[in-house]
Amino acid sequence: MARDENPFRSLTQLLRDARDGDPLASNLAFSLIYKQLHAAARRQLQRAASNGVTLTPTALVNEAWLKLSAARFEIKDREHYLAIAATAMRQIVVDAARARLSGKRGGGAVHLAIADEVGSDAHEVGVLQIDAALQRLEKLEPRLAQVVQYRYFAGLTEEEIARLLGITDRTVRRDWRKARAFLYAEIRGAA
């Protein structure tokens, strides 16, 4: 193997090497980033009502890792990878909600609690409603949708998001407020 077998390669380099088929790099990268992926998965699933979600954080991480392992994309850094992983996890949760909804004809819809995230009213909103609202936001204001994706789903800090998007922390805060207002209005209008 021509690759450097240094186990102290940066996470970014390990992820790149894993994408290129290096099994050692894949194992090392997974062990280094697992806790962060697990925390992101736990955040997503904690927002889901316990009666509707059958995924565990570990299962969600494993599904996302497998999905991303098969994908070919350029990895900029840890934050970029976490953002992409959060998107993959969101898609997996939405797909699970759609499957459950189609199987139960609406009776078993998965719900998310978004009290402090999108608005001030404590209520539950369906995963599919949040996904639809986020897709509408993405069509109108792609950067605002990215901020939601990175903060709400990936759990990145304002500083990490700013670095990832090449904007200031202040712009991230402003975008977050605008995005929350948009999503709150969309979800309230759909209810």
Image (cartoon, rainbow, N blue to C red):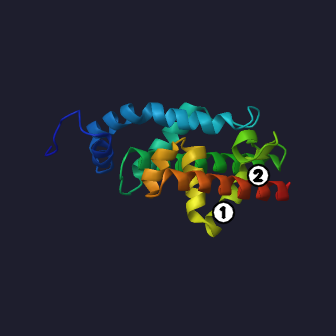
Tell me if I can see residue 187 in this picture: yes
Instruction: Please report the residue visible at 43 percent of the width from the left and 50 percent of the height from the top.
Output: 80
Instruction: Please report the residue visible at 83 percent of the width from the left and 50 percent of the height from the top.
Output: 105
Q: Which residue is mark 2?
A: 102
> x, y (%) of residue 118?
72, 47
Please state which of residues 188 and 125 is positioned toward the viewer in this rendering: 188
Q: For residue 49, what is the image quadrant?
A: top right
Question: Gap between marks 1 and 2, in whole Å?
Answer: 25 Å
Rate crowding at label 2 as few (under 14), some (14 to 19) or many (20 or more) other CA atoms within 10 Å: few
> Closer to the N terminus: mark 1 or mark 2?
2
Q: Is residue 48 left or right of residue 56?
A: right
> x, y (%) of residue 104?
81, 46
Q: Which residue is mark 1?
A: 137
Rate crowding at label 1 as few (under 14), some (14 to 19) or many (20 or more) other CA atoms within 10 Å: many
Report the amino acid beneath label 1: Leu
- In the figure, 52 relative to 133: above or below? above
Mark closer to the observer (1, 2):
1
Q: For residue 71, what is the image quadrant?
A: bottom left
Instruction: Please report the residue visible at 83 percent of the width from the left and 58 percent of the height from the top.
Output: 190
> x, y (%) of residue 26?
33, 39
Element type where label 1 sits in the image: helix
Element type where label 2 sits in the image: helix
Residue lying farthest bottom?
140
Residue lying farthest front?
170
Please state which of residues 121 and 61 is positioned toward the viewer in this rendering: 121
